[in-house]
Amino acid sequence: MTALPRLTPHVSHAFVAAAATLALLSAACSSDSGGSPKPQPGVTPGALSVCAPNPSPAATNLKVTDFGYRELDQPKQGQTYRSPLMVTGKANPFEGAFSVTVFDASGKQIAAQNYHKDNQKPEFAVSLPFTIGSPMQACVWVHERSGKDGSPTNITQVPVQLTP
């Protein structure tokens, strides 16, 4: 067996300080302070990164009266859902038009539907049916469509687990 090299007091103190800092950071990152929801059993850590980089993120500093405002209650990150997917929250999309699209981990569209809401009230609730053969990770987009070319804009992404 090879003997470990003997550390000088300066190196060992630096090593202990680095280890203590790492332990504190690890504890802070893993504590449950009511931040993001914990994945349900059966949801792998990959479910939390199933969404690709957002091509057109929704603004996050808007008031409920601003066009583009969005606050989702459901779905929640990392949670498991069956069909139909219920999407609820508050929003103020331009002219009340918004869409919900669900993608699998490879980016293939599983389901999509356009919706329209009354912008007199910010609350909305929609139901999006989908059909899958086995449990999978997915990325839910709640977004608007560009008036210029119809492309998705102001996208809010939520990584979830879907089950048949």
Image (tube, rainbow, N blue to C red):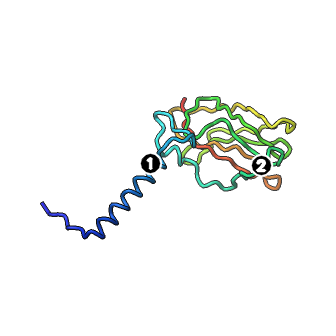
Q: Is residue 153 visible?
A: no
Query: Residue 129: horizontal and vertical position, in percent?
Result: 66, 31
Q: Residue at x 69, y 35 (%)?
A: 87
Query: Residue 41: horizontal and vertical position, in percent?
Result: 46, 33
Which of the labelled discs sits on residue 145, or is there none? Answer: 2
The answer to which of marks 1 and 2 sits earlier in the sequence is 1
Q: Along the line of sight, which residue is nearer the eye, 6 or 77?
A: 6
Q: Quadrant of residue 140?
A: top right
Residue 114 left/right relative to 137:
right
Q: Is residue 111 above or below residue 55?
A: above
Tell me the amino acid under the disc marked 1.
Answer: Ala
Q: Along the line of sight, which residue is nearer the eye, 103 or 140?
A: 140
Residue of label 1 = 27
> From the viewer's perspective, is the residue at label 1 or at label 2 nearer?
1
Q: Quadrant of the N terminus?
A: bottom left
Q: Is residue 57 above or below residue 99?
A: below
Instruction: Tell me the crowding category of disc 1: few under 14, some 14 to 19, or many 20 or more residues within 10 angstroms, Cα based.
Output: few
Q: Residue at x 66, y 44 (%)?
A: 141
- Residues at circles 1 and 2 in contact by the CB criterion of under 8 Å: no
Q: Quadrant of the C terminus?
A: top right
Instruction: Tell me the crowding category of disc 2: few under 14, some 14 to 19, or many 20 or more residues within 10 angstroms, Cα based.
Output: some
Tell me the amino acid under the disc marked 2.
Answer: Arg
Q: Is residue 61 visible?
A: yes
Marks 1 and 2, Cα distance to the nearest angstrom? 42 Å
Q: Is residue 53 above or below residue 11?
A: above
Query: Residue 113: horizontal and vertical position, in percent?
Result: 72, 38
Residue 10 left/right relative to 145:
left
As helix, strand or loop, the secondary structure at mark 2 comes to strand
